[in-house]
Image (spheres, grey):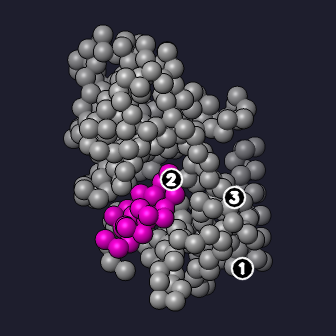
Amino acid sequence: MERTQWNQFVLEHGPRSGRFLQSWEWGEFQTAVGRDVRREELYRDGTCVGIAQWLDRSLPGWGRYSFCPKGPIVSLPGEMVFSGDKKMFLRIEPSDSRSVAGARKTIDVSPAHTRITDVSMEEEDLLAAMHSKTRYNIRVAQKHGVKVQIESSDFESVWSLFEQTSSRGAFRLHGRTYYHRMLESLRTKTCRAFLATAYQENHLLAANIMVDFGDTRTYLHGASSNQYRNFMGPYLLHWELMRDAKERGFQFYDWWGVAPQNAPEDHPWVGISRFKRGFSGVEYASPGTYDLVLKPHAYSLYQLGRSLIRMVHHYG
């Protein structure tokens, strides 16, 4: 299957959130950062009924496994048998819970819960559906003269802001090269990654890495300054990104991860989820991340080893 057909299948049958991870272009980006990418197609009676873009990974001392972020993608409900030759397990993130029969739940890699805003609504309706505090903070940013740049080339300044945000414990970063290569590789109209920034005079207040694919703009990563928080830069940045998405013909704005509605107050995403829920939207849940075990004995030993390592880190 060639690129256009592959992407069309992803757009027609992929999950509501995270389809871009199975796009052909995302696979090319993963190859560019040194990952082993393998594309698999499943046919029945000459018709393609499933695809999977696998990232083949090594576990030093244990063997290999394959990870299919936000996939496999199938056009028919139920179980599909994909290849796992010589792999210890297949790590999957299907959108249908019927696809995880016999699989073992593991720690979620991609967000299982997210919030999606329909930006095809009129701007007045989008604003009216927000929490009053969110609307107020947008006006505060505008009053302070915060300026938003939808496509920024200032990667060096933005990278230092991401490091600053990560040090606060907000999220775990990939290496600098990973994000730089993402922005360099994903420049196509089909799947596009870009930086967006918010400044007040010469002060960088906030920065986002966004991904456009199909009818959806996804907020992949965000960072904000420890200083000048009273300027409310992140609020205006997202509002302008939503307005821009609407103008460009996108229908959805995916906030890419919130804590479950019943999450305890100590959940690491409670704060950022409160921010995201200030904007209008509908919440979606997927089954999450599962392991299809192909070598049970080796997998049990691997899981035991992981538990011991986590225990040492926790008490060390």
Sequence-first disc among 1 and 2: 2
Mark 1 to mark 2 CA distance (whole Å) = 32 Å
Residue 106, label in figure:
3
- Graded by Cα atoms within 10 Å as few (under 14), some (14 to 19) or many (20 or more), the crowding at tag 3 reads few
Which residue type does callout 3 highlight? Thr
Sequence-first disc among 3 and 1: 3
Q: Which of marks 1 and 2 is in front?
A: 2
Dot 2 corresponds to which residue?
16
Q: In which quarter of the image is residue 235?
A: top left
Does the magenta segment cover residue 20? yes
37 shown above or below 109 = below
1 shown above or below 114 = below
Considering the image in quadrants, where does the N terminus appear?
bottom left
Sequence-first disc among 3 and 2: 2
* Image coords of residue 91 (percent x, y): 61, 67
The residue range painted magenta reads 4-27
Q: Main SS of the magenta segment?
A: helix
Circles 3, 2 touching at the beta carbon (< 8 Å): no
Mark 3 to mark 1 CA distance (whole Å) = 16 Å
- Identify the residue at the far bottom of this view: 45
Which residue type does callout 1 highlight? Lys
* Image coords of residue 233 (percent x, y): 36, 22
Callout 2: SS: loop
Dot 1 corresponds to which residue?
295
- Classify residue 81 as left or right of residue 311: left
Which residue type does callout 2 highlight? Arg
153 shown above or below 64 = above
Does the magenta segment cover residue 80? no
Q: Please name the residue shown 32% across and 78% down the image.
A: 2
Callout 3: SS: loop
